[in-house]
Every structure is written in structure tokens, then in C-alpha cells.
Image (cartoon, rainbow, N blue to C red):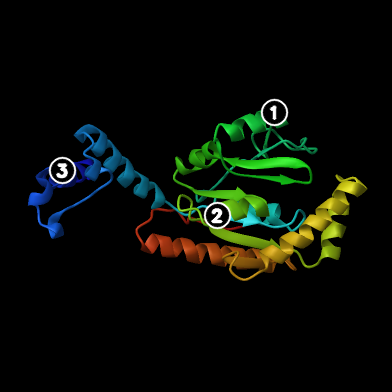
Amino acid sequence: MLLNNVLSRTAAALRICTKGSQAPASRKIFIGQCVLRQNNRQYIARAFSSVNGNMVKQGPRPLVICGPSGSGKSTLLKKLFKEFPDTFGFSVSHTTRKPRPGEENGIHYHFVSVEEMQSAIENGEFIETAVFSGNMYGTSKKAVENVQHQGKVCVLDIEIEGVKQIRNSDRLNPLLVFVNPPSIDELERRLRGRQTETEESLLKRLNTARSEIEYGTSPGNFDVVVQNNNLKQAYEDLRNFIVRELETQQGQGINVSLNRVFDE
């Protein structure tokens, strides 16, 4: 049905286009590159591609979650995935840093070399990339597409620089969430508790966190700021925001599951 509509509209547009100056100005329809008189096959393919692209945009909006390392993003996302197991799919980022204990390649990150990452960037395989604490991070187009093909809300856990690259993206139109820690002192306590950082890398993370918090809490940069002073309240705030947004999308005819799993 969609293709038939496109074809019929295209044929009408082409008929008008071939009349040239004989058609009144009010009836001249210029779609795509019709005014350049491209052949019909090329034009129809382009028109259908354009409509199909709009269909992709009508899927659930991706969810971007951002915050300093140690802010509690991972814990909040685990709770979200547990409560709504059919709703979300995680976009697995690429990074050049080494795996931490317990991390698995392809699950927590795609761990790659600097050379592999640079080559993929040059080939245009990434939506966004950033350098954080001396390591490269990025979200590949394929990672997002893998989740979208499952009909799920794609979740992206990315750095501030990545947010800046995609926050105005027409292609993604994401929901932007910033998770704010209680304080820098509490953030330092959490990072030291991990025992995964050298003193030098920890200080770098704290310095980066200060600039992240400044950007993340500035009005207009994110759709919502979740203050993670208390995990239970922070999750409730995050969940309420997301459910409200997805219900709005459902009201617009977007198919997205909100089936919940309740704790016993």
C-alpha cells in the first residue's frame, strides 16, 4: 500500500513536471530532483527511500543516558531493563580501553584497538565518537540498527562529547537523560571503592566529571536531570520520565511495548 501511494504520487508529479511552463505555477510540484528531470526509475527509488526513512523515524525514540563515571548509570539501567525486559535494547559501544574484571567483549563493550577504531571512524561507521581519559569511545550505526530491528527502544550510554554530536540529530531524535551524582566527594568515594583506577586516572576522571556536571545540569542540554542522591528515588524519577514519554509516543501511533515485570 505504501509503495503504491508513492508510485501514484510520483507519476502525477512527473506528468506535471513534463508539462513545463504549460502548467500553472500553483500546480507545479517539485519533489526530490524532479526539476532536474532525472529518469523515472531513479526518482521513484529516491521518493520511496525518503518515505521509508520517515517510517524509521516513527519508531520509538532512542534513549541516551549520560553522566560521570560512578554516577550510577549502570545500576539504573539494570533496574530499567529488569522491569521492562521487552522494551529496551542496549547499544553496545566500542572502546579502545582494556576490559575491566568481569567485562565481556560484545556485551559490555566492543573492545578494539586504536587502529581498528580509527579505521572504522574513517569508513563512516559511527554515529558519535569521543575521547575520554585517553581512550576512544563510540556508538556504531550497526549497534543502533541491531536494536531497532528488534522493535525496541535503543539505549545509548555515552559521554558528553557524544551527546553534543547527536543531541540535534534529525535521524535519532533521542530522549536525553543526565544522571547527576550527589557531589564530587561522593563520586570520588564510589570510584575509589571500585579499586579499578590508578591515582592519576582517578584524578582525571574527577576533573572530567566536574565539566560533565556543569554541562549536564545546564538548562536545555538534557530533557531531564536525574539526581542520584538516593537510588530508589532516582530510579523512580527516571522510570516515570521514560514511561510518560513512551506513553506519549504510543498515543502518536508508535508501537512500543511497556509490559512490566513486577518484583515478587
Amino acid type, label 3:
Leu
The quadrant of the image that shows the N terminus is top left
Q: Nearer the viewer, residue 35 or 193?
A: 35
Rounded to the nearest angstrom, the CA distance separating label 3 from label 2 is: 40 Å
Q: Is residue 25 left or right of residue 230?
A: left
Q: Which residue is mark 3?
A: 14
Residue at mark 1: 115
Q: Is disc 2 placed on a helix, strand or loop?
A: strand
Q: Is residue 212 above or below residue 22?
A: below
In space, the residues marked 1 and 3 are separated at their CA atoms by 48 Å
Looking at the picture, tell me which residue is in the foreground, 31 or 223: 31
Q: Residue at x 21, y 33 (%)?
A: 39
Identify residue for label 2: 63
* N-terminal label among 2 and 1: 2
Question: Where is residue 199 shown, x and y percent of the image?
Answer: 92, 49
Question: At label 1, which amino acid type do we have?
Answer: Glu
How far is the residue under mark 2 from the one under mark 1? 29 Å
Horizontal relation, residue 35 to residue 260: left or right? left
Give the amino acid type for the residue marked by disc 2 in the picture.
Answer: Leu
How crowded is the residue under tag 1: few (<14 C-alpha within 10 Å), some, or many (20+)? few
Residue 207's x, y, as percent? 82, 57
Q: Quadrant of residue 76?
A: bottom right
Can I make out residue 246 in this image? yes
Residue 79 visible in the picture: no
What residue is shown at x 21% (from left), y 39% (from top)? 37
Seen at 23% across and 36% down, the residue is 38
The quarter in which the C terminus is drawn is bottom right
Disc 1 secondary structure class: helix
Q: Nearer the viewer, mark 1 or mark 3?
A: 3
- Secondary element at tag 3: helix
User: What is the residue that sits farthest to the left in this orientation?
Assistant: 22
